Image: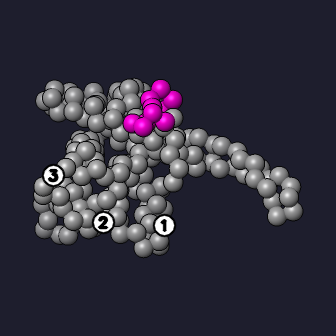
Amino acid sequence: MSLHQTTPKYDVFLSFRGEDTREKFTSHLHKELCRQNIETFIDYRLERGDEINSSLVEAIKESLIYVVILSEHYASSGWCLDELTEILKCKKEYKREVIPVFYEVDPSNVRRQSKSYEKDFLKHQHRPKDKIDAWKAALTQVAGLSGWDSQVTRFEIVKGCDGGDIEIDAAGGEFEGNDDILDEDGGDGVDDF
């Protein structure tokens, strides 16, 4: 752990590609976090005149939990990929939590950089190979963490007040890791929150 660990200013840092999710999932998540009095950093909280890059890095360092919303074209943004790389550095250095949200994207496509992620990386061909390799490694790492997959629909049977069974559609509400990756503790990749 670093000797210069920063004091957390934010409970949650939201990382997302604005064009994909800002007016959809991200705005709703942000609103609910605020409603619950959870201090949340979202990119429009940067003060005018701030140098965006250093301000974002500082906000990442000052956050306890990172929610990374991986959408169809997240990988098209070098900005998002740089943000993710910094988030994973802080996860390692400060032992912070990272929760990936696979928003309308298959976690295996993120992990393997296939389909839209493969196409989006073609746009980065002009970038240094070591930067591209770091971005790919970061995507592979984050896709291996337990998180939330919006494409998963799970039905649960619960007992009603009268003792009868009720079937509940828990659409997208399942926290799930990748089937072929185990947690660090050897578990199945599913965490209880």
Which label's residue is closer to the chain start, 2 or 1? 2
For label 2, the residue is 10
Q: Nearer the viewer, residue 6 or 60?
A: 6
- Where residue 21 sits: x, y (%)? 42, 52
Mostly what secondary structure, the magenta segment? loop
Determine the CA span between mark 2 and mark 1. 15 Å
- Secondary structure under the numbered disc 3 in the rendered image: loop
Q: Residues within 10 Å of mark 2 (few under 14, many from 20)?
A: some
Which residues lie in the magenta part? 177-187
As displayed, is residue 49 above or below residue 164?
below
Q: Is residue 48 magenta?
A: no
- Residues at circles 3 and 1 in contact by the CB criterion of under 8 Å: no
Chain-order first, disc 2 or disc 3 = 3
Q: Is residue 181 magenta?
A: yes
Q: Residue at x 53, y 50 (%)?
A: 192
Judge by depth and name the residue closer to the eye, 26 or 90. Answer: 90
Q: Residue at x 42, y 73 (%)?
A: 37
N-terminal of the pair, mark 3 or mark 1, is 3
**Residue that badge 1 annotates:** 32
Looking at the picture, does residue 36 appear above or below residue 122?
A: below
Q: Position of residue 161 (x, y in %)?
A: 82, 64
Element type at marker 1?
A: helix
Alpha-carbon neighbours of circle 3 within 10 Å: few (<14), some, or many (≥20)? few
Q: Nearer the viewer, residue 144 or 121?
A: 144
What residue sits right under mark 3 in the picture?
Answer: 2
How far is disc 3 from disc 1 in space, using C-alphas? 32 Å
Q: Amino acid at mark 1?
A: Glu
Q: Which of the colour schemes (rainbow, by chain, secondary structure, one colour) is used?
A: one colour
105 over 37 or under it: above or below: above
Residue 78 in picture, x, y percent from top left: 23, 41
Q: Amino acid at mark 2?
A: Tyr
